[in-house]
Amino acid sequence: MYTYSTIHHLNNRLNRYRAEGKTIGFVPTMGALHPGHISLIKKSNETSDITVCSIFVNPTQFNVAEDLDKYPRTEKKDAQMLKDAGCNVLFLPSVDVVYPPDKDNSYAVDFGDLERVMEGEHRPGHFAGVAQVLKRFLEIVKPDAMYMGQKDFQQFTIVRALLKKLKSKTKLVMGETIREEDGLAMSSRNMRLTKKDRAIAPLISKTLFDAKAKIGKKSIAQIKKEALKQLDIPEFKVEYFEIADGITLQPISDISKVKTAVACTVVHLGGIRLIDNVILK
Ligand code: AMP
């Protein structure tokens, strides 16, 4: 596996691959890798000739500075995991490489209603930061395909809209959410949970799967009410639990009226923000 931290060196390598007619798959990450990230590397290996993974903790997508400071950094272990998974190129840029101080790095884009609900509503500026960094990475890597997780369903939807706005030729591919045996969605943040909180956390995914099991038997309003009741334990602070149209992300009341639907939630547990979703239809 080649590791680069400058655009110049990365491009030299990628241009060589392109000259050989190879397709480039790209997996953007913030590091602290786990099997969820690795499943995206494997997906890219299956459908692209070359897999590039970036590790960059993007400061512009954190609306709480403390979250950025506490973001786990496990670069050495990450590199080994990527190598073992068959990743070809690791891109490890510094903040100045991604956002050159002598350039205007701003990128203002309006995603309309997509960014006014759920994550967008509760993390002001978050998706602006995500769009800014991904626009930059798309310029740098110019991948044929980009692989992102269902775990961040709204982010995936926003990125789909971003690619459309940029008239990008990059294909966006979704990887399913990889879970721990007890159902908890794998996340870099899980390692920050206390042992006690880690034991309680699977109630989040259980609630989502229970909601899915009730589809067709109960109304959406009733399912939502019961889910909120299930999550109502002293340790949890529920930020939102929403049942939304899988395309527009707007809340729905009748699942028969939409093509796809998703139940999304964010729960705070011991100060850790945990996100998860389950596709209902
Ligand atoms: P992050 O490093 O958290 O920014 O995530 C990088 C990519 O990995 C994003 O596309 C995430 O959606 C994806 N991802 C994170 N956790 C999981 C998971 N448990 N299963 C599948 N993909 C994931």
Image (cartoon, rainbow, N blue to C red):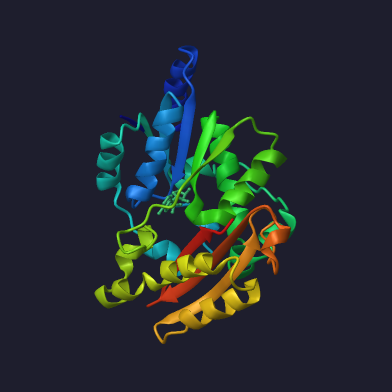
**Up-down relation of residue 221 to residue 153 (above or below):** below
Q: What is the quadrant of residue 14 in the picture? A: top left
The quadrant of the picture occupied by the N terminus is top left
Foreground pick, 274 / 166: 274
Q: Residue furthest front?
A: 217
Task: Tell me: 27 left or right of 257.
Answer: left
The answer to whether residue 124 of the structure is visible from this angle is no
Q: Tell me residue 95's x, y (percent).
A: 47, 47
**Up-down relation of residue 32 to residue 168 (above or below):** below
Foreground pick, 189 / 151: 151
Q: Residue furthest top?
A: 20
Q: Tell me residue 131's x, y (percent).
A: 61, 48
Q: Tell me residue 154's x, y (percent).
A: 59, 56
Foreground pick, 68 / 188: 188
The quadrant of the picture occupied by the C terminus is bottom right
Q: What is the quadrant of residue 117 in the picture? A: bottom right
Task: Tell me: 105 left or right of 212.
Answer: right
Q: Tell me residue 238's x, y (percent).
A: 51, 77
Foreground pick, 94 / 265: 265
Task: Tell me: 263 left or right of 94.
Answer: right
Task: Tell me: 280 left or right of 257.
Answer: left
The answer to whether residue 217 of the structure is visible from this angle is yes
Q: Which residue is at a point 45% across and 39% down the rendered structure image?
A: 27
**Up-down relation of residue 272 to residue 276 (above or below):** below
Q: Which residue is at a point 44% across and 18% down the rendered structure image?
A: 17
Q: How many numbered badges does the structure rendering display?
A: 0
